[in-house]
Amino acid sequence: MHAHAAWSNRPRPTPPRSSNMHEVVQEWYANYVEVEQETLFELILAANYMDIKPLLDLTCATVASMIKGKTPEDIRKTFNIVNDFTPEEEAQVREENKWCEEA
């Protein structure tokens, strides 16, 4: 059986139940996506372009696990995202989306 076939037949938690992919998927899959961030995003683009849903699911789950449990500031740091909100805009967005933090 091809590796992608094995991945596609396995139920996957959505969102991942852990930020550690080794706790979410089998070791081979977790090791496969232990790559530099740039490579991971290139894999996502390639999987999407070639319509390889199991690989797209695996790589997107990996990104989700990188975000899980982090603050917006931590996420910005992880993905090198510049915060272009003014303090007032950020406070407004947090207020409008307070329900997200309650979950």
Image (cartoon, rainbow, N blue to C red):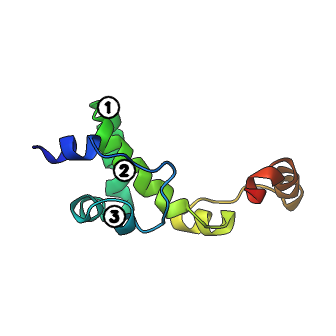
Residue name at image x 28 percent, y 41 percent = 8
User: Which of these two is toward me, 82 or 61?
Assistant: 61
User: Which of these two is toward me, 61 or 77?
Assistant: 61
Q: Quadrant of the N terminus?
A: top left
Q: Earlier in the sequence, mark 3 or mark 2?
A: 3
| Residue 90 drawn above or below residue 53 | below
Question: What's under tag 2, amino acid-wise?
Answer: Thr
Q: Please name the residue that numbered disc 3 is placed on.
A: 36
Question: What's under tag 1, amino acid-wise?
Answer: Tyr
Q: Quadrant of the C terminus?
A: bottom right
Q: Please name the residue that numbered disc 1 is placed on.
A: 49
Residue name at image x 61 percent, y 63 percent = 76
Circle 3: element type: loop
Q: Percent x, y for residue 37?
A: 39, 60
Q: Please name the residue that numbered disc 2 is placed on.
A: 59
Q: Earlier in the sequence, mark 2 or mark 1?
A: 1
